[in-house]
Image (tube, grey):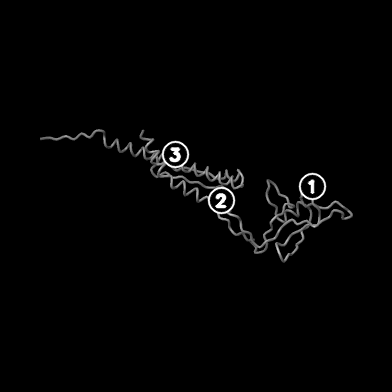
C-alpha cells in the first residue's frame, strides 16, 4: 500500500510569507516609533522655550536603511547633545578654572547670532574696561564706568563733563549655577518604547490583509 501526503497550501510558502509580513511589520513599526519620538522631542523642546532651531537638531534613522528586517531598529539623537543634555538633566555648572562664572546682565547685550559675550569679548567690542566689585551679600559684579544707551546697553560715555556717567553692572559673578531642568526626554522615550509591541502587531495584521 502506498500513501501520499499533499499539504495545501504549501507550508514553506506560508512560512515564507509570514516571515516577510513580520519583516515589514517590525520595520514599519520601528520607523513609526522613531519618527514619533523625534516629533515628540522636538515639540517638547519648542514648548520649553528653547527654540525651533534647537528642536530641529533632533534626528531619527531606521535601520536597516534599505530593506526590511525582523531585527529592525530606530535611533533618535540630537546634533547638539551637550545643550540638550544640560536642559534634560539640570546640571550644576562650575567654572572650569575654579573661579567665577560670569552671567551677563541685559546691559551686556549679545554677540553675533544672539550668542552671549564673555567679559573679554565685551571689553573688545565696547572699548571699555570692566571693574570688579566684591559684594558680601549677593553675587559680585563686573561693572563698567559708562552709561546706558536708549536700548539699555552699557556703552562708553560721550560726555566730557561726566554728566550722565554711571557705573553699569555688566556681569554677575557667581561660583556656580544650577541649570533648571526644562526637558524630560526619558518620559517620551519610555512611552514610545511601551507602544512598540502594539505597533508591530498592528502593522503585521495590516501587512497580511
The residue furthest left is 1
Query: Alpha-carbon neighbours of circle 2 within 10 Å: few (<14), some, or many (≥20)?
Result: many
Task: Tell me which corner region of the image, top left, top right, bottom left or bottom right, holds residue 56.
Answer: top right
Residue 75 rendering spot, x and y as whole percentages: 48, 46
Labels 2 & 1 near each other (Cβ < 8 A): no
- Seen at 75% across and 63% down, the residue is 133
For label 1, the residue is: 150
For marks 3 and 2 on the same chain, the one whose residue lies earlier in the sequence: 3
For marks 2 and 1 on the same chain, the one whose residue lies earlier in the sequence: 1
The label shown at residue 66 is 3
Image: 98 above or below 81 = below
- Seen at 80% across and 57% down, the residue is 167
The label shown at residue 61 is none
Residue 181 rendering spot, x and y as whole percentages: 58, 54
> In front of the other: label 3 or label 1?
1
For label 2, the residue is: 183
Horizontal side of 72 relative to 148 (left or right) equals: left
Residue 40 rendering spot, x and y as whole percentages: 52, 44
Horizontal side of 157 relative to 82 (left or right) equals: right
Amino acid at each position: 500500500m502506498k500513501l501520499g501526503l499533499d499539504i495545501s497550501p504549501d507550508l514553506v510558502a506560508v512560512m515564507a510569507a509570514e516571515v516577510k509580513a513580520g519583516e515589514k511589520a517590525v520595520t514599519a513599526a520601528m520607523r513609526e516609533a522613531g519618527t514619533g519620538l523625534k516629533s515628540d522631542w522636538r515639540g517638547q523642546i519648542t514648548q520649553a522655550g528653547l527654540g525651533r532651531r534647537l528642536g530641529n537638531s533632533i534626528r531619527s534613522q531606521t535601520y536597516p536603511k534599505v530593506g526590511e528586517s525582523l531585527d529592525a531598529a530606530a535611533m533618535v539623537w540630537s546634533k547638539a547633545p551637550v545643550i540638550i543634555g544640560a536642559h534634560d538633566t539640570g546640571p550644576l555648572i562650575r567654572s572650569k578654572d575654579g573661579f567665577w562664572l560670569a552671567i551677563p546682565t541685559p546691559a551686556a547685550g549679545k554677540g553675533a547670532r544672539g550668542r552671549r559675550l564673555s567679559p573679554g569679548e565685551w571689553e573688545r567690542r565696547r572699548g571699555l574696561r570692566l571693574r570688579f566689585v566684591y559684594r558680601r551679600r549677593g553675587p559680585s559684579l563686573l561693572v563698567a564706568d559708562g552709561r546706558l544707551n536708549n536700548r539699555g546697553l552699557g556703552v562708553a560715555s560721550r560726555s566730557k563733563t561726566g554728566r550722565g556717567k554711571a557705573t553699569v553692572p555688566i556681569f554677575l559673578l557667581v561660583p556656580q549655577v544650577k541649570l533648571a531642568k526644562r526637558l524630560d526626554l526619558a518620559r517620551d522615550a519610555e512611552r514610545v518604547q511601551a507602544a512598540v509591541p502594539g505597533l508591530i502587531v498592528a502593522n503585521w495584521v495590516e501587512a497580511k490583509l
